[in-house]
Structures are given as C-alpha cells and as structure tokens.
Image (cartoon, helix red, strand yellow):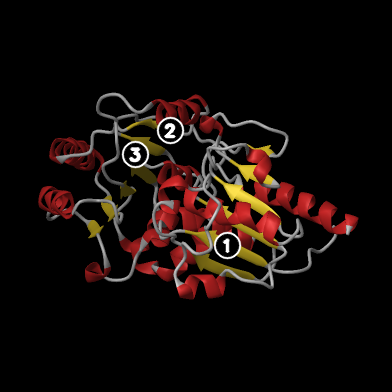
Amino acid sequence: MLKLHGDCWVITDAAAGNQRQALALAQRLELPVRHLQLEPAAPWSWLAPRLTVGALSALSSAQRQQFAAPWPTVAIGCGRTSALYTRLLRNLSAGRVYTVQVLDPRIDPAHWDTVIAPRHDRLSGPNVLQPLGSLNPVDVQWLQDGRDADPGFAELPRPRVGVLLGGPRKGVTFNEGYISQLAGQLLSRQREEGGSLLVLASRRTPKALVELMRQRLQGRPGLIWSGQDDGSNPYPGVLGWADRLVVTPDSVNMLSEACAVGCPVHTLVVGALPEKLERFHQALRQAGRLHDIDAIAVPPVEPLRETTAIAAMLYERIAARQLQG
C-alpha cells in the first residue's frame, strides 16, 4: 500500500468526546498530527458551519496564528464548530487539503472530501462513511496498556463490573431518582454474585449525583472516580479489566467504547430516549451488543471496533488523491 506523505491537522472544540474521535482516527493514518482547538466567537459559534464570511476574524489572535499556512495535507474535524474550519480549508488551500469531517455537519456533505457520520444520523452521500457507533481508540493494544497501567485491579474480586456514568442531556432521564435506581440494581446483583464495582464519572456527571452513588455503594469492593481528587483517571484500566460494563444510556461515545471492549455491555433506560439515540440503542441491541441491566445469560459477540476499518477506507481515498498529484 502507498505510504501517505505530509501531515495531519486535527481540529476540534473543547469537547473531550470530539477530540477523542478525531485523534483516534488521525493516529491510524500514520501521519504527524497537530491538534488545533478552535473556538470562534459568536455568532460564528452559533451558526457554524454555515456562516463562513469573517470566520477567521472570529478566532482569537493565538488561534489565528495556529490556523494559518502552510496548510496540512489532511485535516480532520469533529463537531459542528470544527466543521466551519475544515470547510474553509478547501478554499484556503485551493483544494490541496484533504478535508474530513466526523459527525453530521448539518449541511451538504459535499463541502468536504469525506464525512464520517454514525448510521443513526441517517446522512448519506457518495463521500459519506457510516459506522454504527463513534470512532474511538479502543483495541487490543489499548486494553493491554490499560491493564498494564493498573495491575492492582487484577486483585479485585470478580466479576469486575465497570460502571460508566454520563450526564443529563435533553430527552434522557438522568437525575437523583435514576442514580438511586441504578445503584439499587448494581447492589442487588453484587449481593447475589459478589465481585467489585468500578464506577467512573465523566465531566458531565453532576457532583451531587456522584456523591449519591458514593453513599449508596459505600463499603463495596471497587472504586468511584470522578476527577483528579480521586487520583489519575483509571478509565483504560477499568475497561481493560472489566468482566462486564454498565453504561448510562446518554452517551453514544461511551456506549461505542464499551462495545469495543468485548465483554457484555448493559444499560438502564428510564422512560423514552430521543429518536436518534433510540435508533442507536436499537441497532446495538439487534446486533446483540447491548442488554438490559438485569440480563444474565449474555451470548458473546465480536467487539465493535470500527475505527480501524474506517481509517483504512480513508487511507485509500487519501492515497488515491496523492497518486493523482
């Protein structure tokens, strides 16, 4: 296979999920990567990626110095804000930059060379790639690195149950009642089968709900991590050592990464989910990758590891462009 030449810019906002997806994809292209975090002022931040006039002046002075020629060979953006600047690069570089946008930009995908949008977005086009879930770094080596980083987890009683907490989002029940119900389900099963509970909060998890979970699970083997006050982030280690994962239903990224591990994945849904999120849940369930929290006998399935395949398709497209000169 032709080796790509040049370099790659990753363009995101501050959202950790967007950064994670774009960087996971870029690292598989085996090009030098430079990460630009661009956050334009209003109204460009509101209207991205539609409003292009004046978009450069919407950046701070430091960000304008970063987003300047010489332009990269490839630019990968993730999220609506970054889509404004990956879109601009086509004109700024006279078409020499191969532009990639991750997630539905909500305008015609023809503004980019390739758009990667999850299947539940229902975005189609000749340049659109449609993974089932979100892009992520989870693979065999990443999981082994996680186990190596936290070897002490091997001493915890099994089954080791990783619990990934997201946070409130429109249309999803995520409150004290939900956390109480989730904790009750976790405790009930832990009393029946033993094991340990390794709970990880995200940046979006309200502190009051983390404290409620701490209170409910007090004295149980395992850990509860919600930030640097609890030590370094053990997320890779928890996924690497988990016998089972329980994930709140709100995050496509967390569910996708959990399904990439290869162990059973469970969730607790209270009430209805938003339409697009419900489509994603149903696709995982139909593929045997996601189960109710109280499901016991779960048949094994292949891990959901789409990033490598998506990167390979993208690699071929960029290589074909480079062959054309």
Marks 3, 2: nearer the viewer? 3
Residue type, numbered disc 1: Val
Of all residues shown, which one is farthest toward the front? 53
Q: Helix, strand, or loop for circle 2?
A: loop
204 relative to 315 in the view: left or right: left
Query: Foreground: 170 or 52?
Result: 52
First in sequence, mark 3 or 2: give its number.
3
Tell me the residue at 28%/33% (across/down). Answer: 172
- Residue at which label 1 appears: 10
First in sequence, mark 1 or 2: give its number.
1
- Residue at which label 3 appears: 250
Q: Is residue 158 visible?
A: yes
- Residue at which label 2 appears: 290
Asked if marks 1 and 2 touch (Cβ < 8 Å), the reply is no
Q: Helix, strand, or loop for circle 1?
A: strand
Q: Helix, strand, or loop for circle 3?
A: loop
3D distance between C-alphas at marks 3 and 1: 26 Å
3D distance between C-alphas at marks 1 and 2: 31 Å
Residue type, numbered disc 2: Leu
Of all residues shown, which one is farthest toward the right? 324
Determine crowd level at label 1: few under 14, some 14-19, many 20+ residues with C-alpha closer than 10 A.
Answer: many
The percent coordinates of residue 116 (x first, y second) are 61, 43
Query: Foreground: 192 or 169?
Result: 169
